[in-house]
Amino acid sequence: MLARSLRRSSGHGSIGSLCYFFSKDGNHCSFTSQAPTTLPVTSKTSTLDSYRTGDGYADINWDELGFGLTQTDYMYMMKCSKDDKFSCGELSPYGNIELNPSSAILNYGQGVFEGLKAYRKQDGRFLIFRPQENAIRMQIGAERLCMNAPSIDQFVDAVKQTVLANKRWIPPPGKGSLYIRPLLIGSGPVLALEPAPEYTFLVYTSPVGNYFKEGRAPLHLVVEDRTYRSTPGGTGGIKTIANYAPVLKAQCEAKAKGFTDILFLDSATKENLEEAASCNVFILKDNIISTPDTQGTILPGVTRKSIIDIARTYGYQVDERPISIEELMAADEVFCTGTAVVVAPVGSITHLGKRVHYKVGELSQKLYTSLTGIQMGLLEDKMGWTVEVE
């Protein structure tokens, strides 16, 4: 109602402390609590047009990219009430957002997020890897947390817009990727434990290199036997925001002892492998690849799914099943997969003081080369996984 009543004129103005802005055609409206001069009057179309005209790179050292946050230029935002569907979002300059102190995300952790990447090809074009899979996973997580979610098309379109607006931050070929972080949060205020009355969908980006400081060097993992990442019937199988902070204590303690990351066991039997703090795990034994079946306690990774498909095209038998800690320690080769880590070989695993070393085998390198070749446009994408941004 407010937007309809204000759309009669273009320019900007204010209602109390709330400032509003319109494009000249009156069809694009944005709100901010900041002064009007801090946010230029810009429509989604004009923002994208400004970046189509310049193909230069951002002024950063591309050879020193890690996995820290580098602020880019634009973010995407879309909102809806709990009784509506998401409809129209828009780009705005990257910056802080306002949240009510009683918002459901701040009080009850009602939120899910995703992670995917965009790559710059040798010919200058841009590719996104399997965004539809992330959209579907967000919808599954949102349903579990009683949240409204954007449609697959809305999700993919928002990702494309955000990538294109920040294209100068996409690293040169072979130097890294543009990490894309979609967020869906309960932004509306609540006091009682109930679904939020409003939801906000956000997308922002950051150029990244290797996730672990070791780069492509083998990982050294330790099995965590005191705390557990998830429980049967819980939320381990969705990418909810609330799943991640609880692993920090065990992870920090492990890193302080020189380990790269931790491995979690299942909370029911305390005998079977589940996953690492931020990635899935595979083992190779007698030329058979195995990975823990998800069954609601393990995140169904997009990279995990892709690696299973690639391995099977090479003729490998891939089993999704429970893997005991004894099998893990006796494996011929172990590697981790994830959007952030891609495919990372494991050099050692420590459990109850016993450390087992693994060779960095040909399998993980072969799978890494195949996956990244598809992601970067170096190999033919026979799977139909990549989406071009133009």
Image (cartoon, rainbow, N blue to C red):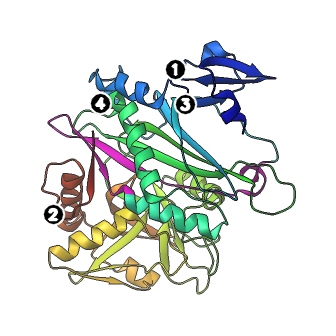
Image coordinates of residue 370 in percent, x first then y, are 18, 59
Q: How many angstroms separate mark 4 from mark 1 (CA)?
A: 42 Å
Q: Name the residue nearer the viewer: 136 or 210.
A: 136
The residue that label 1 is drawn on is 24
Q: Disc 2 vs disc 1: which is toward the camera?
A: 1
Q: How many angstroms separate mark 4 from mark 3 (CA)?
A: 39 Å
Q: How many angstroms separate mark 4 from mark 2 (CA)?
A: 31 Å
Q: Disc 4 vs disc 2: which is toward the camera?
A: 2
Kind of residue at disc 2: Lys
Q: Residues within 10 Å of mark 2 (few under 14, many from 20)?
A: few
Image coordinates of residue 218 in percent, x first then y, are 32, 56
Q: Which residues are magenta?
A: 103-131
Point out which mark residue 28 bears: 3
The residue that label 4 is drawn on is 63
The tag earlier along the polypeptide, 4 or 1, is 1
- Quick one: which residue is furthest to the front in this view? 8
Residue drawn at x 87%, y 55% is: 191
